[in-house]
Image (cartoon, rainbow, N blue to C red):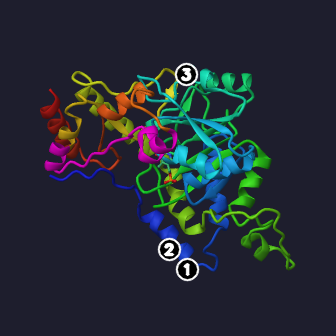
C-alpha cells in the first residue's frame, strides 16, 4: 500500500467553476475573487479581505502597508515555515526570533517581553498546525508596548480560540491556499482584517500601486484614467484561483469534521505510546497537520523506514534560525531556542487529509507503532 502525504480535496464542482471562468470574458481578478474575499471575511468574522497570490505575499504586504521605519525589529517564532521570517527581511526589517511553547509549538508569549527594544514594531503570530495562539494574552502584551500583531494563519482558516478568529485581534491575518493547505487552489493566499484602510492599501499594493484595478476600470460607465502613488507589486489573486476555492469554502466545515475524526483515531492509537502537541481549552483547532514526537536519535531513521513502507511523511519544521541564511547572517548558536530545537528534532508529520481511507489510516498506525513501541 502507498499512502500519499497529502491529497487535495478539489471536486467536480470546483473544476466546473474554474472551467466556467475560463469560458468567460474576464479571467483575471473579478467577481469570483470578490466573492471569495467576502466568504473568507464572513467565515472569519472580519469586515474586509483581499485575495492574493500567496500567504507570503500577504505577510509581505501587511508589513509594507504598516509602513514601519526601515530595519524595525519584528518578533517572530523560531519554529515555523521560512516565509514567516523571510517576509520580514523582504520588507526591509529584522526578524527577532522567539522560542515556542513546549506543549503546542506556538509562540511562547511569556518569552516575548525580554526581546522588546525601542526598534520593535510588531509580533508575527503563527497558528502552528492549525491551533491559534492565545490572542487575548498576546494582544494585552502588544497593547502594553504599542506593538502591532500580524497573524501567519497559513495553517488556520477554520480555527478560533476563546471565540477569537484570525484577524479579529490583530492588524490582519494572512492565509495560504498552497497545494497542501486545508483549502487549496495550487498557489494562492489572502488577508483578512477589520481595518478598512489597511485592506485598501493592500489592495492597491497588490496591483502595481494603481488606484483602480482592471475590473473596476472595465466595468465603470465611462473610461477612467488611473493614477499611481507608490510603485506597487503584482500579487493579485485572479478568478481561476478564486473559482477553485469558492465551493471548498462551502465544504470547509465538513472537511474539518472528517479531519477531526481522523485526528481522534490517530490520537487514540498513538497517545498511549507517544507525545503529540496538545490542544488547549476553548480552542477550535483547524487540524491542518498531525504531528507525532519520537526519540530524537531515531527520528530520521523512522522517517526512512516509513518511506520504505511507502508512507510519505514530512517534518514541520526545522527551526528557522538554524537555516544557513539566518545562521550565517545573525550567528545563531545551538541552544538559543531550546524548545524549537527539541520539537524540530523529534517531530514527524503524518499523512492527514479528509480522503484518507480507513485502511490507509490503519496502515499508517500499524507501521508507526511497530517503529516506536
Ligand atoms: C505554507 C506556509 C506559508 C506560505 O504560504 P504560501 O501561500 O506558500 O506563501 C507561510 N507560513 C506557514 C506557517 C506555512 O505553513
Q: Residue at x 68, y 22 (%)?
A: 140
Mark 2 vs mark 1, CA separation in Å: 6 Å
Which mark sits nearer the N-terminus, 3 or 2? 2
Which span is picked out in magenta?
Answer: 304-330
Label drawn at residue 19:
2
- Residue 204 visible in the snapshot: yes
Question: Does residue 310 belong to the magenta stretch?
Answer: yes
282 vs 54, nearest the viewer: 54
Residue 302 vs 243, above or below: the answer is above
How far from the left and from the top, in percent, is residue 48?
71, 48
Question: Does residue 335 belong to the magenta stretch?
Answer: no
Q: Residue at x 73, y 41 (%)?
A: 194
Mark 1 vs mark 3, CA separation in Å: 53 Å
Q: Which residue is mark 1?
A: 23
Q: Which residue is mark 3?
A: 111
Numbered disc 3: secondary structure: helix
* Label 3–label 2 contact, CB within 8 A: no
Left-right relation of 128 to 215 = left
* Label 2–label 1 contact, CB within 8 A: yes
Residue 7 vs 279, above or below: the answer is below
How far from the left and from the top, in percent, is residue 99?
49, 28
Which mark sits nearer the N-terminus, 1 or 3? 1
Mark 1 C-beta to ligand 1 under 8 Å: no
* Label 1–label 3 contact, CB within 8 A: no
Amino acid at each position: 500500500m502507498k499512502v500519499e502525504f497529502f491529497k487535495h480535496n478539489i471536486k467536480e464542482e470546483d473544476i466546473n467553476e474554474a472551467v466556467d471562468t475560463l469560458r468567460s470574458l474576464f479571467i483575471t481578478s473579478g467577481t469570483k475573487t470578490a466573492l471569495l474575499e467576502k466568504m473568507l471575511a464572513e467565515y472569519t468574522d472580519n469586515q474586509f479581505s483581499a485575495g492574493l497570490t500567496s500567504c507570503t505575499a500577504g505577510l509581505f504586504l501587511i508589513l509594507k502597508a504598516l509602513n514601519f521605519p526601515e530595519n524595525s525589529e519584528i518578533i517572530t517564532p523560531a519554529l515555523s515555515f521560512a516565509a514567516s521570517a523571510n517576509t520580514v527581511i523582504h520588507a526591509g526589517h529584522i526578524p527577532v526570533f522567539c522560542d515556542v511553547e513546549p506543549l503546542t509549538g506556538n509562540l511562547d508569549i511569556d518569552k516575548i517581553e525580554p526581546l522588546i527594544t525601542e526598534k520593535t514594531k510588531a509580533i508575527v503570530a503563527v497558528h502552528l498546525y492549525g491551533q491559534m495562539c492565545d490572542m487575548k494574552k498576546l494582544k494585552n502584551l502588544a497593547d502594553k508596548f504599542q506593538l502591532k500583531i500580524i497573524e501567519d494563519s497559513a495553517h488556520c482558516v477554520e480555527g478560533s480560540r476563546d471565540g477569537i478568529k484570525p484577524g479579529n485581534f490583530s492588524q490582519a491575518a494572512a492565509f495560504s491556499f498552497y497545494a497542501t493547505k486545508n483549502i487549496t487552489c495550487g498557489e494562492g493566499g489572502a488577508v483578512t482584517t477589520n481595518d478598512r484602510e489597511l485592506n485598501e492599501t493592500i489592495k492597491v499594493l497588490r496591483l502595481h500601486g494603481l488606484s483602480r484595478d482592471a475590473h473596476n476600470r472595465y466595468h465603470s460607465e465611462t473610461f477612467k484614467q488611473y493614477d499611481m502613488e507608490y510603485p506597487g507589486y503584482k500579487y493579485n489573486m485572479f478568478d481561476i484561483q478564486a473559482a477553485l476555492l469558492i465551493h471548498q469554502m462551502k465544504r470547509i466545515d465538513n472537511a474539518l469534521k472528517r479531519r477531526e475524526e481522523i485526528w481522534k483515531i490517530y490520537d487514540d492509537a498513538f497517545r498511549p505510546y507517544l507525545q503529540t502537541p496538545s490542544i488547549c481549552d476553548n480552542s477550535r483547532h483547524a487540524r491542518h497537520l498531525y504531528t507525532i514526537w519520537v526519540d530524537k536519535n531515531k527520528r530520521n531513521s523512522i522517517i526512512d523506514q516509513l518511506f520504505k513502507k511507502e508512507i510519505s511523511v514530512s517534518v514541520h519544521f526545522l527551526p528557522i534560525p538554524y537555516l544557513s541564511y539566518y545562521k550565517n547572517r545573525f550567528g545563531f548558536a545551538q541552544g538559543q531556542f531550546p524548545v524549537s530545537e527539541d520539537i524540530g528534532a523529534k517531530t514527524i508529520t503524518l499523512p492527514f487529509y479528509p480522503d484518507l481511507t480507513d485502511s490507509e489510516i490503519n496502515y499508517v498506525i500499524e507501521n508507526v507503532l511497530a517503529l516506536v513501541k
